[in-house]
Image (cartoon, rainbow, N blue to C red):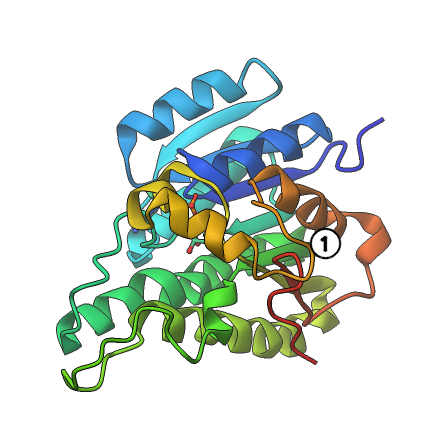
Amino acid sequence: MGRLDGKVAIVTGAGRGIGYAYAERFLREGASVMVAEIDANTGKQAAAALAEIGPAEFVATDVTSVESVEACVQATVDNFGGLDILMNNAALYGDWDMGDQSFEYLKKIIDVNQHSVWLMSHAAAPKMVEGGGGRIINQASGAAYNYVSPFRSDEFTGMGTFNYQMSKWGVVGLTKFMAGSLGTWGITVNCIAPGVIDTEATRKAVPGTVIEMLAKQQAVPGVLNAEDLTGAAVYFASAEARFVTGQVLVIDGGKHMPA
Ligand SMILES: NC(=O)c1ccc[n+]([C@@H]2O[C@H](COP(=O)([O-])OP(=O)(O)OC[C@H]3O[C@@H](n4cnc5c(N)ncnc54)[C@H](O)[C@@H]3O)[C@@H](O)[C@H]2O)c1
């Protein structure tokens, strides 16, 4: 018996990294999973590998496009007969250009990382209501609480845009507004805010020694991996969490402990 037996889930950005790990765990708990991914290569490969575990399909999805997210939700309902769980995981993270501090790039990051959460949820909620309720889980980041950058320079180079950090703060806030709005329809909305997770994307963005250095600053030292997050997602998605909504769970070894 899985904890998500018979449930249907969409996981955005499941072509690789943490999204793939969420998809894999949902399948092992008995759910069917739609891999909603912009990168057709990784998306197809991921769905093929995941199909070895349970019912998994791929649909090419750009989470910033109204037409694309609506098509993704419809394809999920057509394939699996409904929609119960939405894991809003996709973001510009591995492909994030930290050096680009332009206003245009700030808008792009907010669009991909934050507006997409609203857009996907807006498309998914009516199908969840039709099925009697659902679960939305948003992926924020401990970066939302990193007010002081570890990479400050000694020279004043102008105020930065805080693009990634702002986008994830927005995800935290959106979680609470969505929870307040959708609860009456049996939909809970919660959020996972991971610390530095050892994924391919992190290894690209952050030098290896920095990951180990940051891991030592946690209350519980050690390098986290994607599997350290999946149990929390299953809990939020499960029947046990039916009265848990609007919550943010920070999973980072105790680096950040927001009230
Ligand atoms: N890895 C970490 O340390 C860490 C920490 C905190 C939060 N996060 C968050 O976790 C999530 C996954 O992180 P990851 O390490 O697996 O990163 P990743 O870059 O490997 O994964 C992101 C996935 O989203 C997809 N994606 C990007 N834009 C998209 C779009 N417009 N439409 C659909 N899919 C799109 C990418 O193709 C990729 O498969 C992200 O939301 C990230 O911000 C990661």
For the residue pair 199 and 127, the one nearer the viewer reads as 199
Query: Does 166 sit above or below residue 138?
Result: below
| Ligand 1 has an atom within 8 Å of the beta carbon of the residue at disc 1 | no
Tell which of 82 and 7 is nearer to you: 7
How crowded pointer 1 is (Cα within 10 Å; few <14, some 14-19, many 20+) is rated as many
Horizontal placement of 111 versus 227: left or right?
A: left
User: What element does badge 1 sit on?
Assistant: helix
Q: How many marks?
A: 1
Tell me if I can see residue 74 in this picture.
Answer: yes
User: Does residue 206 appear left or right of residue 88 in this picture?
Assistant: left
Q: Is residue 155 above or below residue 134?
A: below
Residue 154 drawn at (x, y percent): 22, 80
The residue that mark 1 highlights is: 236
- The residue under label 1 is which amino acid type? Phe
Say which quarter of the image contains residue 254: bottom right
Query: Residue at horizontal 67%, vertical 55%?
Result: 135
Q: Residue furthest top?
A: 52
Q: Quadrant of the N terminus?
A: top right
**Quick check: 219 above or below 9?**
below
Residue 89 visible, this angle: no
Query: Can you give x and y, in whole percent of width and height, for residue 112 in the image?
Result: 31, 60
The residue drawn where x is 56% and y is 40% is 225
Q: Is residue 188 left or right of residue 49?
A: right
Percent coordinates x, y for residue 243 in the rendering: 83, 65
Which of the 4 image quarters holds residue 40? top left
What residue is at 38 percent from the left and 43 percent from the top? 208
